[in-house]
């Protein structure tokens, strides 16, 4: 096996303290954020696969529903298979706050020991221990550093999950978080047994027909404003009904909107119910997606963010688009 590069100094420094938490427990909780994605699931599952051989029972939980799209991650069938250990330390991955854990939010607020591992710039530090590295391409990249610092064996199932966190959070090595360190980590994870073609197939080449039908609906109804600098679309409950898709299947559609030449902000509105709208934002150039989402209580990264508004679709469109046009200096349409 190839020599692994050293972990980030910040992770190496925090590693002994976090290890002492692991060492003193036999049962641990690994919590994913709601609307689980490849990073939160892959981080938690890799953590489980790495610690299991050391005699640690790690329960991986995620607020249901766990999107079907992640069926290919090794160990996904164990998510929610066991309940969280009472009193045991809780690790939470890729979450900007306890509320991101959905049904597990109060458990986290009450837990005596919470280890918060994340890479979101908007993470305020809510754990007993916070390991927040905003330069990391994925939370899994931080977990990889942590496992290296602990000098624990990284089994192939853990390597595959960690590779999936990097592949998904970089959008297949396309977003501008695709750093030299992320690419090196990916290469090392391949040397540890991750299969890039298999994981790419699971991530990008396993979409149900209903996803494409639904994306067709979105693409048909796109709006291009301000010389294509603002591109936006919406998916309604009627669209989902007609195409047989679930709301979660719209998750990748925002990346389709973010392929237009000259675009600076892409926004996708998802009507979850008559009074709840979820909004995904992608940006380029000067626009900070996290700052735009923060105006509405959301968060995320500079290039990718999201928010929820407890208002009907049309009202959410009105509010968020107005802010986007203001940021771009674009006029309101007639
Ligand atoms: Mn992430």
Image (cartoon, helix red, strand yellow):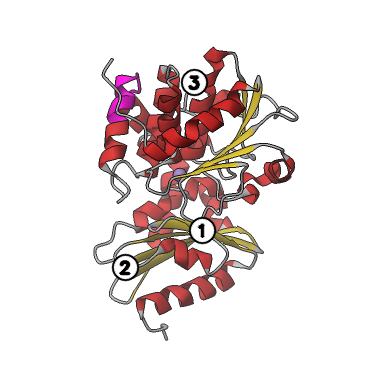
Q: Secondary structure at mark 1?
A: strand
For residue 62, side relative to residue 41 (left or right): right
User: Is the residue indicated by label 1 positioned so its CB lies within 8 Å of ligand 1?
Assistant: no
User: In the rendered image, which residue does mark 3 sit on?
Assistant: 50
Q: Is residue 38 above or below residue 155?
A: below
Tell me if residue 296 is in the magenta stretch: no
Q: Which mark is residue 228?
A: none
Q: Are marks 2 and 1 in contact (CB under 8 Å)?
A: no
Measured from the top left, where is residue 67 in percent x and y?
Answer: 54, 39
Q: CA distance from mark 2 to mark 3?
A: 40 Å
Tag 1 residue: 299
Label 2 belongs to which residue? 286
Can you say whether 112 is above or below 242 in the image? above
Decide which of 44, 127 is in the foreground and name it.
127
For label 2, being within 8 Å of ligand 1 is answered: no
Nearer-N-terminus badge (2/3): 3
Tag 3: Cα neighbours inside 10 Å, few (<14), some, or many (≥20)? many
Q: Quadrant of the C terminus?
A: bottom left
């Amino acid at each position: 096996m190839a020599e692994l590069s050293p972990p980030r100094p910040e992770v190496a420094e925090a590693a002994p303290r976090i290890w002492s938490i692991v060492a003193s427990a036999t049962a641990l909780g690994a919590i994913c954020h709601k609307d689980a994605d490849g990073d939160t699931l892959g981080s938690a599952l890799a953590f489980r696969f790495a610690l299991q051989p050391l005699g640690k029972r790690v329960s991986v939980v995620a607020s249901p529903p766990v999107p079907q799209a992640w069926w290919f991650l090794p160990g996904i069938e164990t998510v929610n298979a066991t309940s969280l250990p009472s009193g045991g330390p809780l690790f939470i991955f890729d979450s900007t706050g306890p509320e991101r854990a959905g049904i597990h939010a109060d458990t986290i607020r009450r837990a005596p020991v919470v280890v918060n591992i994340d890479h979101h710039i908007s993470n305020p530090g809510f754990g007993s221990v916070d390991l927040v590295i905003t330069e990391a391409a994925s939370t899994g990249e931080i977990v990889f550093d942590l496992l290296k610092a602990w000098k624990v064996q990284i089994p192939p199932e853990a390597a595959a999950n960690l590779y999936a966190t990097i592949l998904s959070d970089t959008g297949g090595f396309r977003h501008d978080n695709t750093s030299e360190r992320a690419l090196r980590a990916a290469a090392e994870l391949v040397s540890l047994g991750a299969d890039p073609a298999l994981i790419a197939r699971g991530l990008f080449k396993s979409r149900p027909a209903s996803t494409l039908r639904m994306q067709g609906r979105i693409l048909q109804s796109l709006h291009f404003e301000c010389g294509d600098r603002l591109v936006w679309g919406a998916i309604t409950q009627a669209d989902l009904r007609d195409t047989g898709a679930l709301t979660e299947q719209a998750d990748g559609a925002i990346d389709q909107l973010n392929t237009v030449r000259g675009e600076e902000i892409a926004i996708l509105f998802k009507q979850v119910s008559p009074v709840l709208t979820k909004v995904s934002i992608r940006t380029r150039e000067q626009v900070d997606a996290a700052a735009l989402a923060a105006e509405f209580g959301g968060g995320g990264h500079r290039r990718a963010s999201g928010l929820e508004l407890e208002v009907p679709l049309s009202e959410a469109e009105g509010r968020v688009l107005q802010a986007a046009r203001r940021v771009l200096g674009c006029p309101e349409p007639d």
